[in-house]
Image (tube, rainbow, N blue to C red):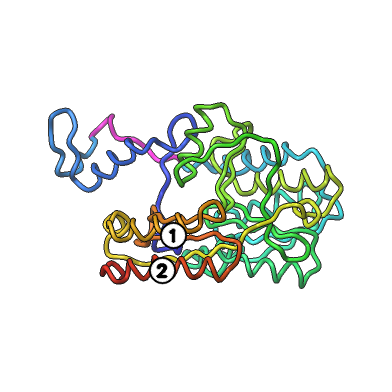
Amino acid sequence: NPFYDNGIKLIDCYGEKMPEETLLLVEDYLDGKLHVFDKDWPELPFAHREHIGCTVDYVAGRNRYMGYLISLGIYSFKRVKVGLDCANGASWNIAKSVFDALGADTYVINNKPNGTNINNNAGSTHIEGLQKFVVEKGLDVGFAYDGDADRCLCVDEKGNVKAFDEQGIGYAKTAVGDKYVYEYMAKNGCRIGGEQSGHIIFSKYASTGDGILTSLKMMEVMLAKKMPMSKLAEPLKIYPQVLENIRVTDKKAAQNDPAVQEAVKAVAEVLGDTGRILVRESGTEPVVRVMVEAPDHDTCQKYVSQVVEVIKNKGYAV
């Protein structure tokens, strides 16, 4: 997100994101709308004396985290030229240090955060910058993180953005959001889960998405197979997608409008098993996202425009 749509993440004592019902209570508490213990809490009750908590700036945590990531490396990255796009965010002073420690020749862009440039034409949401950088510098591989560095997208030596899959492995689909992915993983003992955005969770090593960890694991596969990233991803056919974000007055109302739902259903029926449509609200921005995946770009654009037009005609667009 741009800096003005950034928020905070609340982590529980197990190192996992708090459940949705707890987060909703926290939001109600901050908004003065909390009702618990048969009582309304219209104002924030201040703690007094020994009940006052404290904030701990865990400076040593950064070094321990870096040490942990480095300890996971089982191959030397020596003579591998790696490009990193840090999105002017959380990975700006960590990712390069980890890759350097493992022996890579590391080249970095967007590693100068100033408080307002996070994700600004940078990182995994603007992958074109890294694509150009990798090709121009003649690098072997590139990794782009997002602002809070829990996502990672990979660019091969030719500048192509790739996804990875293996045949014969069972999988399940969850609701959109890394929180739902992890909930399913924890309940069913899954080892890996993720989203197309590059949000990957390796439950053996971490309880949340970790972009730097993801990039290290991608390097591990590349070095183990002794193959460039382009060759590893060659068998995979990726359908084109078109995604449009519409700023709206009311995300829920727009998505739940019968006319909008009817338009989405009509597109889904036409696409059948040749593609898919996904309409969802952003968790942090005042936008509704409309995405269509199909065999060709024109088909994607046609059906995205169709649904967007309905949203606009119903008066939800800002």
Residue 62, horizontal then vertical, whole percent? 59, 44
160 w.r.t. 280: above or below: below
**Residue marked by disc 2:** 306
Residue 55 falls within the magenta-colored stretch: yes
145 w.r.t. 207: above or below: below
The kind of secondary structure element at disc 1 is helix
* Residue 150 visible here: no
Amino acid at the residue labelled 1 = Val
102 w.r.t. 155: above or below: above
Q: Is residue 133 left or right of residue 185?
A: right
Q: Is residue 84 left or right of residue 8?
A: right
- Give the quadrant of residue 306: bottom left
Instruction: Determine crowd level at label 1: few under 14, some 14-19, many 20+ residues with C-alpha closer than 10 A.
Output: some
Name the residue at 50% across, 60% down: 292
Number of numbered discs: 2
Point out which mark residue 267 bears: 1
Q: Mark 2 or mark 1: which comes first in sequence?
A: 1
* Residue 281 visible here: yes
